[in-house]
Image (spheres, rainbow, N blue to C red):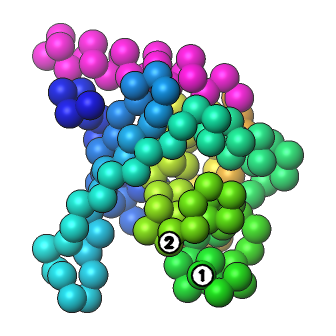
Amino acid sequence: MEDKLLKGYTLSEEKPFLWDYDGEKIFISKIFISKNDKNGKEHTFDFTNAQIDGLLLYIKKKGRVPLGNSVSKVKDGTEKDGIGSYLYNNIKQDTTFQQTSSQLVSIWCDIGVLHYNNRKKGMEFWINDMNWREMLLDFIANKINLVEET
C-alpha cells in the first residue's frame, strides 16, 4: 500500500489524509489530534467493496444525504440520518472509524461518484455515478501516470 498512497483533503476544513485502493479495499490513513496528544496518532481504516456498495446504495436510496458525523451525536444516537451515522450504525460502532466519512466523501467527490452542495456546514451529498470501482481505478491510474511523467 505505501508505495502509491494518494493524498487527499477533506472538503470542509481541507485536512490532509492518505489513501489507497487495492481492488478489494479502500485504505484511509489520517492523524487524529486530541487534547492530550498534540502530535496526534495515525490511524488507518479500510472499507471493503461490499461496505462501499452498501453505503452508496444507502445514499442513492435517500437521494440527498447529510454528512452526519458529529462524534457526540453519533455516540448518543441523536445524529441525523447521514453518512457518518450510517458508518457507525451499519459497519463499525467506533467514532474514530465513523469520522472517516469526511475522507470518503472527499474521495468520492474528487472522482465524480458524489456531488455535494459546496457548503462547509450542512453538507449534503448525492450520487452522480454508481460506477465507483472503474472511476476509482481510472483516477488512481491517472494520478500515478502524472507522477511518473513529472
The numbered mark, 2 or 1, whose residue comes first in the sequence reads 1
Q: Residue at x 68, y 52 (%)?
A: 125
Indicate left or right for 146 with 93 as reference: left
Indicate left or right for 122 with 23 as reference: right
User: Element at badge 2?
Assistant: helix
Quarter of the image with the C terminus in it = top left
Q: Hey, what amino acid is under mark 1?
A: Lys
Q: Main secondary structure of the magenta part?
A: helix
Indicate left or right for 90 with 49 as reference: right
| Circle 2/circle 1 CB separation < 8 Å | yes
Disc sitting over residue 75 in the figure:
1
Q: Residue at x 76, y 68 (%)?
A: 81
Q: Nearer the viewer, residue 11 or 134?
A: 134
Residue 149, position as x, y percentages in the image: 18, 11
* Label 1 neighbour load within 10 Å: few <14, some 14-19, many 20+: some
Indicate left or right for 82 with 120 as reference: right
Quarter of the image with the N terminus in it = top left
Q: CA distance from mark 2 to mark 1?
A: 7 Å
Residue 56, position as x, y percentages in the image: 70, 41
Q: Which residues are magenta?
A: 130-150
Quarter of image, res 10: bottom left
Residue 87, position as x, y percentages in the image: 62, 58
Quarter of image, res 8: top left
Disc sitting over residue 67 in the figure:
none
Q: Hey, what amino acid is under mark 2?
A: Thr
Q: Residue at x 71, y 29 (%)?
A: 130
Q: Which residue is mark 2?
A: 95
Q: Is residue 51 above or below residue 14?
A: above
145 part of magenta stretch? yes
Q: Nearer the viewer, residue 81 or 66?
A: 81
Residue 38, position as x, y percentages in the image: 16, 80
